[in-house]
Amino acid sequence: MFPRFHFLSLQALRLQAVKAAKNLLLYKVVLVCISGLLLLGGCAITQPYGSFIQNPSPAFDQYSKVMANDVADQIGRLYPAASTQFDLRHNANDLFGQALIDKLRSDGFAVLENASPANPFLAAIHSQENTGNASNAPISEEVTKNNGLTLGYIIDQSGDLYHVSILIEDQQLTRAFIAQSGQIQPAGLWVRKE
């Protein structure tokens, strides 16, 4: 009877080892899938920049120019115009962004606009298309390196109150504006966060 008991224990031990190996493989597959999803999620989550005004009023075109002029004046107080370049972090395809770029350039700042598509998948495809070097000449590091300060903005609205945040490198400038009787004016002082 002892040999039969020994045979059953070996069979049970072998079955447990096979089951453990399958579970280990399943755990590895789940771990790889979760890691991949976390990495993809981390790539997709970016700081939101730009205009978050849903239905701009007809007067928003003028409001944008007034706010952009005020923002550019504040930037001019902090940075020298002729020797400062700004590289936009995002596409400036709204009224405020275009007014800000125009005002900064007219004040003497160099502004490098972001030309990448807003969709990260299109940006990846676009960058792959542009990797070819037609002349096969080496591209110097100086040509590809941007020397400007990164610039981004966030503008949103709550009723008659507009909130503008300008992000330059690691510091943030914020100011509220209020619209009354068809005019817009600052609702407070500039707040600087580093």
Image (spheres, rainbow, N blue to C red):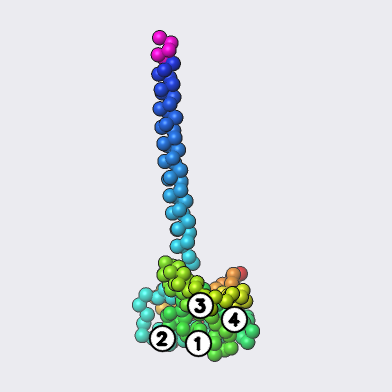
Tag in front: 1 or 4? 4
Instruction: Give the residue type at disc 3.
Output: Ala
Bin the neighbour count of mark 4 within 10 Å (Cα to Cα): few under 14, some 14-19, many 20 and up. many
What residue is drawn where x is 55% and y is 82%? 111
Instruction: Give residue 52's position: percent from left, percent from top.
Output: 42, 73
In space, the residues marked 3 and 4 are separated at their CA atoms by 29 Å
Mark 1 = which residue?
102
Mark 3–mark 2 distance (CA, rounded to whole Å): 42 Å
Q: Which residue is mark 4?
A: 85
User: Along the line of sight, which residue is nearer the eye, 9 or 168?
Assistant: 9
Which is more foreground, mark 3 or mark 1?
A: 3
Q: From where the camera sits, is residue 166 visible? A: no
For disc 3, the marked residue is 134
Q: Residue at x 41, y 23 (%)?
A: 12
The percent coordinates of residue 44 (x first, y second) are 45, 62
Badge 3 or badge 2: first in the primary sequence: 2
Is 163 on the left-hand or right-hand side of 75?
left
* Residue nearest the observer in this picture, 99 or 112: 112
CA gap, disc 1 to disc 4? 14 Å
Mark whose residue sits in front, 2 or 1: 1
- Mark 3, residues whose alpha carbon is within 10 Å: few (<14), some, or many (≥20)? few
Distance Cα–Cα, label 3 vs label 1: 33 Å
Question: What's drawn in magenta, residue-wise?
Answer: 1-5
State if disc 1 and disc 3 touch (CB < 8 Å). Answer: no
Q: Which of the image's four quarters has the C terminus?
A: bottom right
What residue type is disc 4 on?
A: Gln
Of discs 2 and 4, which sits in the foreground?
Answer: 4
